Image (cartoon, rainbow, N blue to C red):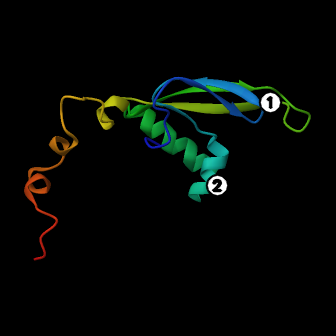
């Protein structure tokens, strides 16, 4: 989910609907993602509920324009809580400072 979240505010086109998503949000259709993950819709809802209860994500519903095939269409938009904690945004700190001390000192060019 973190890798799918947007890194800046933008408007997305999803099934001919414009959807505004903020930084750290992702469009997450529950039924489609349950199918991709190989779980039932009910299991996906339970999983999302657990993430919400643990305050890892927040959700909101977006209503898509109805069509003749789908008169009522809802889309879940997930917001990753503490998204910036998982992103490298500090220019004063080199990326290696985020690695473990062992990784920082290990010379990967040597053959052992």
Q: Earlier in the sequence, mark 1 or mark 2?
A: 2
| In the image, farthest residue toward the bottom | 112
Compare residues 72 and 81 and report the one nearer the observer: 81
Picture layout, residue 36 above or below residue 10? below
Q: Position of residue 1 (x, y in %)?
A: 47, 43
**Image quadrant where residue 26 sits:** top right
**Image x and y of residue 109, in percent:** 16, 67
Mark 2 highlights which residue?
35
In the image, what residue occupies the spot 50% across and 39% down? Answer: 48
* Image location (x, y in percent) of residue 95: 22, 41
The answer to which of 105 and 75 lies nearer the viewer is: 105
Image quarter hosting the C terminus:
bottom left
Q: Is residue 93 left or right of residue 6?
A: left
Looking at the image, which residue is at 30% across and 35% down? 88
- Circle 1 residue: 72
Asked if 109 appears above or below 93 in the picture, the reply is below
Q: Secondary structure under badge 2?
A: helix
């Amino acid at each position: 989910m973190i890798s799918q979240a947007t890194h800046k505010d933008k408007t997305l086109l999803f099934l001919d609907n414009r959807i505004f998503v903020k930084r750290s949000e992702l469009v997450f259709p529950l039924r489609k993602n349950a199918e991709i993950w190989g779980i039932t819709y009910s299991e996906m809802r339970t999983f999302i509920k657990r993430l919400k209860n643990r305050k890892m994500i927040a959700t909101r519903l977006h209503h898509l324009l109805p069509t003749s095939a789908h008169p009522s269409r809802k889309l879940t938009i997930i917001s990753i809580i503490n998204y910036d904690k998982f992103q490298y945004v500090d220019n004063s700190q080199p990326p290696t400072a985020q690695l473990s001390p062992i990784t920082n000192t290990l010379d990967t060019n040597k053959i052992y």
